Amino acid sequence: MHEQPPPQLALALRQPEPNGLDGFVAHGNGAVVAAVRQWADGSGEPYLYIHGAAASGKSHLLVCAAGEIRQRGLSVVYLPLDTPRLTPAVLDDLEQRDAILLDAVQAIAGNHAWEQALFHLYNRAQDARRRLLAAARQPTGRLGLQLADLSSRLAAGPSYNLKPLSDAGRAELLRVGAAQRGLRLGEAMISYILSRCPRDPGVLRDLLDGIDRAALAEQRQPSIRSIGRLLEQLERGANEPSTQSPNQSPNQSPNRIRPATGDPLPPRAGD
C-alpha cells in the first residue's frame, strides 16, 4: 500500500510548471539549470542555493524545478517566503514532501522566529533525506542573517548565481513561450514587444498568457495590433497609483497583468 502524498499548501501560489525545466530558458545560465536538473532527478546534491538580482528569473526557475519533481510522481512544495501574512509555522512538517523549494529567503533575514524555523526545517529535511532548494537575491554571506547556525547551513551546499537574461535571451523566452502555447510570434512581433515591454521575464510571461487568452477568445493568431492593445493595458496598469495593502511586501508589484480568472499572482513572479 503506497503512502498518500501530503496535501499541497492552501496558498495562492503558482502551480509547478507542467513542462518542468524544459519550460525555463537557460540562455547564459546553462550550468545553473544543469545543477537544478540533477538536484531534481536525485543525481546531484540534495541541497542547492540560488541567488540573483531582481527579475533574474529565480522564481520561475524554482517553479520549473517544482514541475520537474512533479513529473516524477513526487510530492513538492514551492513557497515564496515574502508571501504576505505568512508565519514561521508554515514551515512545520514541510519535510514530509519529497522536495522543498523556498523562494525569497532574503525576506526573513533578521527575523529571529523565522530564522529559527528555517534552521530547524533545514535540519529536519536533511535527517529525512529530502531535497531542499533555496533562493534569494543575495549570496548567503550577504543575507544579513542573525543566526550563525542558519547561515552556515545555507552556505553548506553548492551556490549558483542566476544571471538576468540578455535581450537575446528575452527574445528566446518569447519564442519558446509562444511555441509552448501554440502561438505564432514572428520576429517583428518579438522586436515590437521587447521595444515596449518591461525587461522583467515575469512580465513577459504574463504578457504571453494575455496574448494566449486573447488569441483563444478571438479564435485567431495574434497580430501586432492585438499585442499593442495588451501592451497599452500593461502600461496603464504601471501608471496607476499603488493600492498596496499594509501586509503587502514593498518588493511586490501590484501592477502585473492578471489572469482572466482574477486569481492572485505570487509575489514577484519574475524574480
Image (spheres, rainbow, N blue to C red):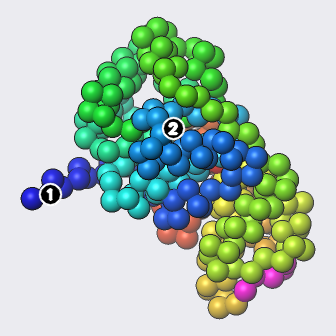
Local crowd size for mark 2, using a 10 Å CA cut-off: few (<14), some (14–19), many (≥20): many
Q: Tag 1: residue type?
A: His
Query: Dividing the image into 4 quarters, which one contains the N terminus?
Result: bottom left
What percent of the width, then of the height, locates residue 119? 37, 20
The region drawn magenta spans 221-226
Query: Dividing the image into 4 quarters, which one contains the C terminus?
Result: top right
* Residue visible at 32% across and 23% down in the picture: 123
**Can you name the residue that lies furthest to the bottom here?**
219
* Residue visible at 73% across and 39% down in the picture: 163
Return the mark for residue 103.
Answer: 2
Label 1: state its secondary structure: loop
Residue 252 painted magenta: no
* Residue visible at 37% across and 43% down in the picture: 99
Residue 219 placement: quadrant: bottom right
Return the mark for residue 140.
Answer: none
What percent of the width, then of the height, locates residue 231? 78, 66
| Picture layout, residue 220 above or below residue 99 | below
Label 2: state its secondary structure: strand
Q: Tag 2: residue type?
A: Asp
State how far apart marks 2 and 1 are (Cα).
30 Å
| Picture layout, residue 103 above or below residue 153 | below
Return the mark for residue 2.
Answer: 1
Horizontal side of residue 173 vs 136, given as left or right: right
Local crowd size for mark 1, using a 10 Å CA cut-off: few (<14), some (14–19), many (≥20): few
Q: Are marks 2 and 1 in contact (CB under 8 Å)?
A: no
Horizontal side of residue 202 vs 65, given as left or right: right
Residue 106 placement: quadrant: top right
What percent of the width, then of the height, locates residue 69? 41, 53
**Precedes in sequence: disc 2 or disc 1:** 1
Closest to the observer, 136 or 197: 136
